[in-house]
Image (spheres, rainbow, N blue to C red):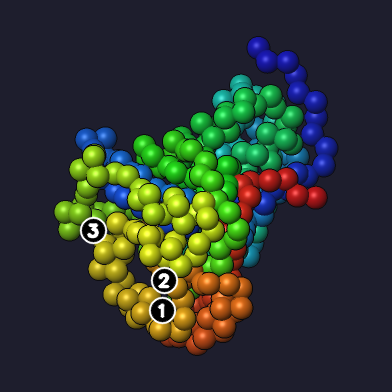
């Protein structure tokens, strides 16, 4: 029987980053239905804010705001599921509650792990609100049960992900990389992109699941042009097959001066790497005029993982 908890007082605020996959190597689907991966994540400065406020014991709710179109506020919301899972895992689900608020800037179904970010934010915020004793890797291990990208949203920075993308090793980088993100007017379902990937027979053999040395070297030396030459996304052909219009966005961004453009994760967000901040400002102005680009955001990477804010 765990000791009774101190009643919570003030709301706890957490900021969580979106991610880009600088490399995404995807294996053939396994018998468990999952695809083994080798991926290089980079967290970028496009954030969701998650606030956890005290609520009566056993009550877990969420209010969504910002760019949250299409995301429900019921028990399936990933922030609510995360809060409940944390309470259950600590054996305190009948002693604690949380009224969560999520302000979204990460595009929904955009290939930038927005739902995972909210789950990560709820785990950190509630662990502080409820004053729980959490092991160093405890939140990450719990988060992996909700989604393979949750551990990285907690860790942030730049990291190699293996397994389902949830076994993480931080990667050394220097400097800062400038990204321009072209957000799409319509989301893309991650399971649908993986299904198309399977139909196209694109899965790699286990021994082909590794990330190129050139990419690691470019990150270590902060060399944006070298990074541009090394980025790679195995899911891009499947995402482009489902959304052929993204080809034109990719091509146009490169014509307008980006070092390279990549589909972010399962898409449809397209991430352009720029040589410096001024190139990113120029590109973002021009890209905003393209049809089917709903909005353009500039972001820097690497960004910190989930963190408390005042
Ligand atoms: P990933 O890059 O991790 O594959 P994504 O960024 O493409 O995912 P999400 O924004 O995480 O996509 O949304 C995936 C699904 O999760 C959507 O169907 C969405 O409705 C659902 N969802 C549940 N809770 C949330 C949440 N708090 N924020 C965003 N999506 C959520």
Residue 99, can we see it?
no
Residue that badge 2 annotates: 260
Determine the residue positioned at 16% across, 54% down: 201
Residue 269 placement: quadrant: bottom left
Q: Residues within 10 Å of mark 3 (few under 14, many from 20)?
A: some
Whole-angstrom CA distance, mark 1 to mark 3, is 26 Å
- Image position, residue 155 (x, y; %): 57, 42
- Image position, residue 294 (x, y; %): 49, 77
In the rendered structure, find residue 196 and report the number of the disc placed on it.
Answer: 3
- Image position, residue 210 (x, y; %): 32, 45
Q: Earlier in the sequence, mark 3 or mark 2?
A: 3
Q: Earlier in the sequence, mark 1 or mark 3?
A: 3
Determine the residue positioned at 68% across, 46% down: 307
Q: CB atoms at circles 3 and 2 under 8 Å apart?
A: no
Judge from the rendering whether residue 241 lies leftward or rightward of residue 99; answer left or right. Answer: left
Q: Secondary structure under badge 1?
A: helix
Of 39 and 13, nearer the camera is 39
Determine the residue positioned at 68% across, 15% down: 2
Q: Earlier in the sequence, mark 1 or mark 2?
A: 1
Judge from the rendering whether residue 155 lies leftward or rightward of residue 24; answer left or right. Answer: right
Outermost residue toward the right in this view: 9
Whole-angstrom CA distance, mark 1 to mark 2, is 6 Å
- Image position, residue 56 (x, y; %): 73, 36
Q: Secondary structure under badge 3?
A: helix
Q: CB atoms at circles 1 and 2 under 8 Å apart?
A: yes
Residue that badge 1 annotates: 254
Residue 87 higher or lower than 186, as above or below: above
Residue 124 higher or lower than 50, as above or below: above
Of 240 and 221, nearer the camera is 221
Residue 309 higher or lower than 141, as above or below: below
């Amino acid at each position: 029987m765990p000791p009774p908890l101190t009643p919570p007082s003030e709301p706890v605020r957490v900021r969580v980053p979106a991610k880009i996959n600088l490399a995404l190597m995807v294996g053939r689907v396994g018998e468990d239905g999952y695809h083994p991966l080798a991926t290089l994540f980079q967290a970028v400065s496009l954030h969701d804010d998650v606030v956890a406020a005290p609520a009566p014991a056993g009550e877990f709710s969420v209010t969504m705001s910002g760019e949250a179109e299409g995301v429900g506020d019921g028990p399936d919301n990933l922030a609510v599921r995360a809060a409940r899972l944390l309470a259950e895992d600590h054996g305190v689900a009948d002693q604690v509650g949380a009224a969560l608020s999520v302000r979204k800037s990460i595009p929904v179904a955009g290939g930038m792990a927005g739902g995972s970010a909210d789950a990560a934010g709820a785990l950190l915020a509630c662990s502080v609100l409820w004053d729980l004793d959490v092991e160093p890797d405890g939140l990450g291990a719990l988060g992996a049960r909700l989604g393979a990208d949750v551990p990285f949203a907690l860790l942030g920075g730049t990291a190699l992900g293996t397994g389902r993308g949830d076994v993480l090793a931080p990667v050394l980088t220097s400097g800062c990389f400038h990204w321009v993100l072209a957000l799409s007017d319509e989301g893309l379902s991650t399971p649908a992109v993986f299904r198309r990937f399977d139909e196209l027979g694109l899965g790699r053999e286990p021994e082909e699941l590794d990330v190129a040395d050139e990419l690691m070297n470019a990150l270590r030396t902060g060399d944006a042009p070298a990074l541009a030459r090394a980025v790679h996304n195995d899911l891009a052909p499947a995402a482009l097959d489902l959304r052929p219009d993204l080809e034109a966005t990719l091509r146009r961004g490169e014509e307008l001066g980006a070092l390279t453009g990549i589909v972010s994760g399962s898409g449809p967000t397209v991430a352009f790497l720029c040589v410096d901040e001024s190139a990113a400002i120029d590109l973002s102005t021009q890209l905003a005029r393209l049809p089917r680009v709903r909005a353009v955001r500039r972001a820097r990477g690497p960004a910190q993982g989930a963190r408390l804010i005042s």
